[in-house]
């Protein structure tokens, strides 16, 4: 990356200003050992949720609620966010963040369990948006389920798609890098999807189901 590109990236990453709700959610994330989405990714999630006009959304990997709050702020008032995490402490922290954000309880559905077990129980083509930010080894299965869950015109968002800038370097053969590199190829080659990769945060891979 050139010096100018690096500076521009840092500038855009530093633009979002977060309120006390998100700052407290970040504090809980760090206390729980969870890596939350960056402020720039959070802002992107809010905008993407808003422009998608999603009524039903699924989040795979709840964390402590930072990304969920960002999604809820972009979703319409009647929209419902279903969020999945295997750790009950994560879900407890997320519910606290949702409450502080002013989101009514009936706008969120928190599900405790392994996403690999929960996702197959969700209804085909019933969701407008799926956000994936979970354990990378399981991404291939999660992506397959996400495409099944999405309606035509639905949006898939995959966080950390550049794997700390390693995906672009073919010499790097870390397990997580190989998984994300393959996910990128799979989505680009899937005729059911239109996709693009944004450098925001550590990479946001976006795909719309035809």
Image (cartoon, grey):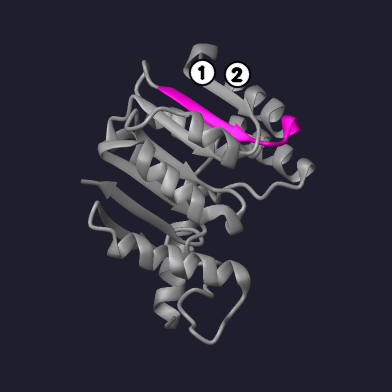
Contact (Cβ within 8 Å) of mark 2 with mark 1: yes
The answer to which quarter of the image holds residue 123 is top left
Residue of label 1: 103
| Crowdedness near tag 1: few (<14), some (14–19) or many (≥20) residues, C-alpha within 10 Å | some
Q: Residue at x 46, y 29 (%)?
A: 122
Q: Residue at x 44, y 62 (%)?
A: 183
The part of the chain drawn in magenta is 80-89
Q: Is residue 185 left or right of residue 101?
A: left
The residue closer to the viewer here, 149 or 102, is: 149
Q: Is residue 11 visible?
A: yes
Residue of label 2: 99
Residue 105 lies, with reference to residue 97, above or below; the image says above
Report the label total: 2
Verify whether residue 85 appears in magenta.
yes
Q: Which mark is residue 62?
A: none
For this orientation, the residue located farthest to the bottom is: 171
Spot occupied by residue 147 in the image (x, y as percentages of width and height): 36, 44
Q: From the image, which quarter does the N terminus lie in?
A: bottom left
Q: Is residue 165 left or right of residue 23?
A: left
Q: Residue at x 73, y 37 (%)?
A: 28
Residue 78 lies, with reference to residue 54, above or below; the image says above
Q: Residue at x 62, y 52 (%)?
A: 135
Q: Secondary structure at mark 1?
A: loop
């Amino acid at each position: 990356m050139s010096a100018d590109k690096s500076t521009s990236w840092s500038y855009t990453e530093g633009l979002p200003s977060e309120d006390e709700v998100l700052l407290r959610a970040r504090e809980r994330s760090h206390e729980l050992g969870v890596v939350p989405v960056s402020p720039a990714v959070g802002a992107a999630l809010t905008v993407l949720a808003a422009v998608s006009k999603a009524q039903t959304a699924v989040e795979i990997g709840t964390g402590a609620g930072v990304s969920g709050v960002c999604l809820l702020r972009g979703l319409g008032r009647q929209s419902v966010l279903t969020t999945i995490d295997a750790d009950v402490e994560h879900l407890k922290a997320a519910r606290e963040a949702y409450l502080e954000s002013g989101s009514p309880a009936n706008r969120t559905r928190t599900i405790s369990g392994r996403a690999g077990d929960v996702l197959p129980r969700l209804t085909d083509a019933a969701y407008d948006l799926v956000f994936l930010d979970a354990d990378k080894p399981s991404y291939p299965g999660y992506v397959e389920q996400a495409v099944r869950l999405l309606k035509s015109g639905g949006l898939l968002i995959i966080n950390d798609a550049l794997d700390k800038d390693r995906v672009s370097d073919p010499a790097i053969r870390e397990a997580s890098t190989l998984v994300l590199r393959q996910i990128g190829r799979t989505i680009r080659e899937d005729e059911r999807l239109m996709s693009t990769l944004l450098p925001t945060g550590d990479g946001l891979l976006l795909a719309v189901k035809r």
